[in-house]
Structures are given as C-alpha cells and as structure tokens.
C-alpha cells in the first residue's frame, strides 16, 4: 500500500470543537508541513450536519443510565458529504480510512502510524461522551482507535496526537528521515539515551562509546542501551522485539536482576 509520489495525503478531522485545532496543528513540524503543502488538514464542524434547528449531535442513551451518546445521523451525513461510502457500496479501499477516537478502540502505536502514513486520506472522528451510536459502525468500515488506557474529555487531543504521529512519517516532513528510523517504538524498542554538547557537564560525562567515532561501536552501544531501557521501563516490548539469541539472553538477565532488586526493596 504505497502512495503515488505526486499524491498528497489529506486529513479530515470531524469535531464539535474546531477551535481546538487553531493552534495545536499549526505548530512545529506539522505546521511547517502544512505550510509547505506536504499534506492537507481539513477541520469539519459536525454540528453543520445536524438534522434539527438546534444543531443537536447527542442524546440520552436507550436503556437509561447517565451520560450522552453521539447521534448517528449527523455523522452519517458528514461522512457522505466528505465522499465516504457505506459498507454496502464501499470498494474496500485501504488507502482511505475512517478513524473514530474511542476509549474502546485498538491501541494506537507506531506500526499503526506507519500504516496510516501510507494512506491517501484519513478521516478522524473525534468521539465524545459515552461514545457513538453503534449503528454508525454497522454503516461504515471504521477503525476504533485509542491513544491510551485513560479517559479524555473528548477526542480532539487524540486526533491531534494521531495527526502528529502519522504526519511526521510523510516524506519531506522531517529534515532527516533517518532520525525517524531511530525513534522509540520503530523497532519495538525504546530509543537509546542521547547526548549533545558539552561533552562534560559538572561531574557528568558523555559515554566513551559515543565519543569514539567508531560507528560499529556506537551502533552496538545504542542497541544495548535500548534493550536496557526496555528491560527497566517497558519489558512488554521485549517480548515482541526482534532480538538475536545473545540479545535475548542479555534481556533475560537484565529482567532477573531488576526483579531481584525490586524484591529486595520491598
């Protein structure tokens, strides 16, 4: 699923609060990328597609209980206006995706960001309240996505996070794309510790390996330190990381040492 070289990525964000994005998507690399027309971001006010004079987009849930539910009609009308097809007539085009921010969704991770970065178009619906009327998910092929196991007041922050994570992977956005390849989570490992000038600060020095000028030694040091960081803070990543036998044995020993230390502290 590769995008044609002359095809520009398009994001559409469907939201109840368009003003949220007035600044958040105009800063740093994403703002520069939009100014360079490397991709487009469209902000769509959901209330414009409400079916009553009060521009109602939510209602109480059937079956009782607290909270509100986002209505199906406005979102359906909005998606049709944006040119999306319902399941019954959809061609199953993987280069066009509809994403719903949802606490009940699949976890958003780097692999998902990479996959979405190859699309031609991503429409993100900012979820709110208890969620969206389930019939919307029956009408459209929608990816429910969560950025973490916690609850936000709305899907706008999640949409901004996803656009940032996806957008920076689009060719031309980063000045040096090699830096993206060394990011945390790109290879199911956290990034290694990094340092810059001065080489000496008070009693702290940059590790000798990074000062050696030996590229093989530097690469080996970074790999080893990335494994160390994972063992300490994200051992779950080591379970799926591609490690050779020596690295896996090293990781196991690290975990045993850490667990032994933790037991002694209790």
Image (tube, helix red, strand yellow):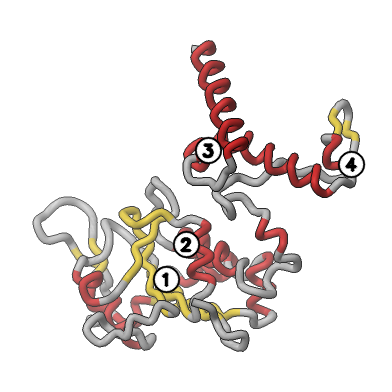
The answer to which quarter of the image holds residue 72 is: bottom left
Q: Are marks 3 and 2 in contact (CB under 8 Å)?
A: no
Badge 4 marks a residue whose secondary structure is loop
Which of disc 3 and disc 4 is earlier in sequence? Answer: 4
Badge 1 marks a residue whose secondary structure is strand
Point out residue 174 in the picture as x, y percentages from the top left corner: 70, 67
Viewer-nearest residue: 185 or 154? 185
| Mark 1 Cα-neighbour bin, 10 Å: few <14, some 14–19, many ≥20 | many
The mark lying in front, picked from 2 and 1, is 2
Viewer-nearest residue: 195 or 1? 1
The residue carrying mark 3 is 234
The residue carrying mark 4 is 212
The mark lying in front, picked from 4 and 2, is 4
| Mark 2 Cα-neighbour bin, 10 Å: few <14, some 14–19, many ≥20 | some
- Determine which of the numbered discs, if any, sits on residue 124 in the image: 1
Which of disc 1 and disc 2 is earlier in sequence? Answer: 2
Q: Residue at x 72, y 43 (%)?
A: 222
Measure the C-alpha gap from mark 4 to mark 1. 46 Å
Is residue 51 shown above or below 154? Answer: below
Measure the C-alpha gap from mark 4 to mark 2. 36 Å
Measure the C-alpha gap from mark 4 to mark 3. 29 Å
The residue carrying mark 2 is 112
Q: Are marks 4 and 1 in contact (CB under 8 Å)?
A: no
The mark lying in front, picked from 4 and 3, is 4
């Amino acid at each position: 699923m590769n995008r044609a070289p002359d095809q520009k990525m398009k994001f559409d964000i469907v939201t109840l609060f368009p003003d949220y994005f007035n600044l958040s998507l105009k800063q740093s690399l994403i703002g520069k990328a939009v100014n360079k027309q490397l991709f487009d971001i469209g902000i769509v006010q959901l209330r414009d597609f409400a079916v009553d004079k009060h521009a109602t987009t939510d209602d109480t849930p059937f079956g009782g209980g607290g909270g509100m539910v986002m209505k199906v009609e406005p979102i359906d009308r909005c998606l049709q206006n944006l040119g999306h097809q319902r399941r019954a007539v959809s061609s199953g085009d993987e280069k066009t995706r509809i994403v719903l921010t949802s606490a009940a969704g699949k976890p958003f991770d780097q692999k998902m960001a990479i996959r979405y970065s190859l699309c031609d178009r991503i429409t993100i619906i900012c979820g709110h309240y208890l969620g969206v009327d389930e019939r919307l998910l029956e009408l459209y092929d929608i990816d429910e996505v969560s950025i973490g196991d916690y609850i936000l007041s709305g899907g706008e922050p999640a949409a901004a996070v996803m656009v940032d994570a996806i957008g920076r992977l689009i060719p031309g956005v980063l000045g040096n794309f090699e830096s993206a390849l060394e990011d945390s989570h790109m290879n199911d490992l956290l990034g290694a510790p990094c340092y810059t000038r001065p080489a000496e600060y008070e009693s702290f020095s940059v590790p000798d390996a990074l000062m050696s000028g030996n590229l093989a030694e530097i690469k080996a040091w970074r790999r080893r330190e990335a494994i160390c960081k994972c063992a300490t803070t994200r051992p779950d990543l080591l379970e799926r990381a591609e490690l050779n036998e020596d690295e896996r044995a090293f990781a196991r020993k690290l975990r045993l040492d850490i667990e032994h230390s933790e037991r002694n502290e209790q």
